[in-house]
Image (spheres, rainbow, N blue to C red):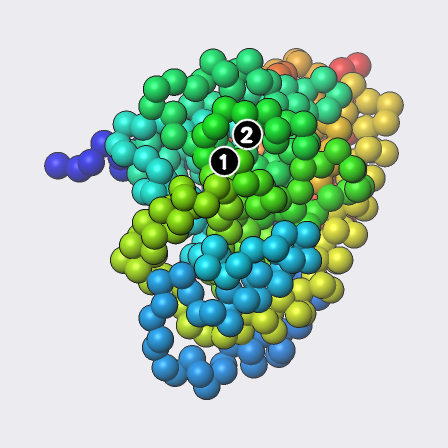
Amino acid sequence: MFSRRTAHEAEPNQLSRALRQRRAAGLGVCDLTQSNPTLTDLPYEGPGLLSALSDPRSLVYEPSSFGLPSARSAVQGLMRGAGCEVSIERIVLTSSTSEAYAFLLKLLCDPGDEVLIPQPSYPLFEHLLTLESVVAVPYRLAYDGAWHIDFDSVARGIGPRTRAIVLVSPNNPTGSFLKQNELTRLESFGLPLISDEVFADFALEPDVRRAGSVLRTDDVLAFALGGLSKMAALPQLKLAWLGAAGPAAPLAAALSRLELVADTFLSPNTPVQWALPAILSTRAGVTAALNARIRRNFAALCTAFRDSAAHPLFLEGGWYATLRLPALFEDGAWALLLLEQDGVLTQPGFFYDFSEGALLVLSLITDESTFALGIALIAERVRNLSG
Ligand SMILES: Cc1ncc(COP(=O)(O)O)c(C=O)c1O
């Protein structure tokens, strides 16, 4: 009766079941997975945001396939700030980055076509691609003290049905940024690039080797994804965008086809589009607070595991840290043990398809006192178990 695309595992996993039981028993949870910024006590300018969202112009519906020009100009200003000059004709507003992916997959792929996705990375890719009847083919990110694209695995993954390569910079959860030499090699495959740059404002340190946005490219079709959910920490406002770049003829064709897709949905709501310039002008305080918290939490993590059998992997940016644990158990078993014995909730690495060792993913945007308590409990457990 139903499509194969929507088949999925309906049973909650062991960790979710254990969490539910713990909460039902009234036991506390020290949650190191919190990645909803609106629940983490950030200095939002609430009244300013709410008044920007009640602009009287929002009472009129003016359908525009790529979004209101004033909002697209605001995005253009952001891109200019990041060193990319992009005309507003090349900017498409969507209601989320997920929707931007869906638009691009409709643009580039027929059912059964393949798209390369990084591994480890954002777990939603599997669903985003499956729902568009597209096959996800992983390529490997390898760790040797820093993260690199394994280009052999990229080359192996490319076949006659490959339609695009997805990259995430910085990646979720490894925090690794795409380097210029990696971008040059990716371009050399001649395939369209879909670059998820939603975490681009979150770097621990500058690094001249980083590629910056793919919007600088004109060798291959390239799409850069951004949105309010991370850069302004406002996921509930449901506004994201994609910018397009590339050689003139395929770029013009891509935009014409994207117009058909976008016009069919006309998704972004009007109030958020009128509010966008004001939202962007007030985001600096929140971004600065988040960056400061990420830095302090990561520093605390490094200190907590300085003389430990566990240690955090090298991190360049993003909202997450990866902690390598002694290989006494697999990461799923570690996460379960920490929840059941210590009340600490973490994400096991297998959620992100890590292939190397027992790894836990921790959210660095967790408020600092919760983070400090959680990592102290993990450090103590590691000490007890590794003798
Ligand atoms: C890599 C990546 N892209 C996109 C998103 C979500 O963006 P949106 O809320 O705009 O769909 C996330 C959320 O965690 C993410 O990790």
Give SS at disc 2.
helix
Position in image of residue 321 (x %, y %): 69, 35
Q: Check the image and report above or below for 133 versus 201.
A: above
* Quadrant of res 66: bottom left
Left/right placement of residue 210 relative to residue 15 reads: right
Query: From this viewpoint, is residue 178 visible?
Result: yes
Residue at image location 62% in from the left, 63% down from the top: 77
Q: Nearer the viewer, residue 153 or 331?
A: 153
Residue at image location 51% in from the left, 68% down from the top: 71
Answer with mark 2 or mark 1, whichever residue precedes in sequence: 2
> Total label count?
2
Residue at the far left: name it: 1
| Label 1 environment density (alpha carbons within 10 Å; few <14, some 14–19, many ≥20) | many
Give the residue number, with chain letter if any, for mark 2: 187
Left/right placement of residue 294 relative to residue 331 reads: right
Q: Check the image and report above or below for 20 versus 358.
A: below
Residue at image location 45% in from the left, 35% down from the top: 192
Q: Distance from label 2 to label 1 (Cα)?
A: 6 Å
Q: Nearer the viewer, residue 327 or 314?
A: 314
Residue type at numbered disc 1? Val
**Tag 2 and tag 1, C-beta contact below 8 Å:** yes
Position in image of residue 155 (x %, y %): 50, 16
Q: On the rendered image, what quadrant is the C terminus found in?
A: top right
Give the residue number, with chain letter if any, for mark 1: 220
Position in image of residue 357 (x %, y %): 63, 16
* Quadrant of res 149: top right
Query: From this viewpoint, is residue 338 visible?
Result: no
Indicate yes or no: mark 1 CB to ligand 1 under 8 Å.
no
